Image: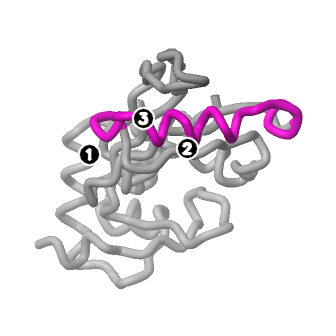
Amino acid sequence: MKVLTVSIADNEVVLVKEQQNARYLRNGVLKEHTIDVIQHFNCGLRRAIFVKYEEDVERSELEELVQAVADYDNEHIADDFVIMTEADINILEFENAEEIIEAAKSVNSEMRNVVLEALPHLPDVVTPSEIGAFTGHGRAAEIASIALIQSGALRMRFHEPVDVDSALINTGKFAA
């Protein structure tokens, strides 16, 4: 599920839950619906996402269902209730999320720490390959740099693919 992949890689999302049940009233009858994804953001916002195919949104009563779930006593679940389709996630955003997650799975905490300790000594905009060269750890530091996008220590520019030559904003420069 693309929205789940992008949510996991998003540095503003601190928790992702799947398949959460919510109640709602329809014609005076209490019913239950399963919300596909709930994102918990670091600002405290919680977003419930109903992931559907675009053609299903257009020919169903989904908007009414989402509104019914939002209107019922579901404040404990989310603050915002939205519908997302495959059209809401662009391919570059999805591919970048996959790269970030793959890097995060393959890097160890020691290499993350090496990169984090180097960031205050590097410019405001830096590439993973420059970080690899600066630390002397080459490819391992490049991968750790890409993984650190997930934490927010490095940020991507919008609409650019992530790779070792990507210009990243060094937000970790000010963390030390």
* Relative depth, front residue between 97 and 32: 32
- In the image, is residue 156 above or below residue 47? below
Residue with the mark numbered 3: 72
Residue with the mark numbered 2: 6
Magenta stretch holds residue 39: no
Front of the two marks 2 and 3: 3
| Residue density around tag 3, few if under 14, some if 14–19, many if 20 or more, within 10 Å | few
- In the image, is residue 160 above or below residue 57? below
* Drawn side of residue 84 relative to residue 60, left or right: left
| Residue density around tag 1, few if under 14, some if 14–19, many if 20 or more, within 10 Å | some
The alpha-carbon separation of the residues under discs 2 and 3 comes to 28 Å
* Drawn side of residue 32 relative to residue 41, left or right: right
The alpha-carbon separation of the residues under discs 1 and 2 comes to 24 Å
- Amino acid carrying mark 2 in the image: Val
> Residue 7 at x, y = what percent?
49, 43
> Residue 148 at x, y = what percent?
36, 53
Most frequent secondary structure within the magenta stretch: helix
Marks 1 and 2: CB-CB under 8 Å? no
Which residue is painted at 26% across and 48% down in the image?
112
- Amino acid carrying mark 3 in the image: Tyr
* Relative depth, front residue between 35 and 106: 35
Magenta stretch holds residue 66: yes
Which residue of the protein is positioned furthest toward the bottom in this rendering?
123
Which residue of the protein is positioned furthest toward the front in this rendering?
28
Q: Could you say whether the residue bearing mark 1 is in a helix, strand or loop?
A: helix
Region rendered in magenta: 55-77
Marks 2 and 3: CB-CB under 8 Å? no
**Scheme by which the image is coloured:** one colour
Residue 111's disc is: 1
Which residue is painted at 51% across and 25% down in the image?
25
> Residue 102 at x, y = what percent?
50, 35
Front of the two marks 1 and 2: 2
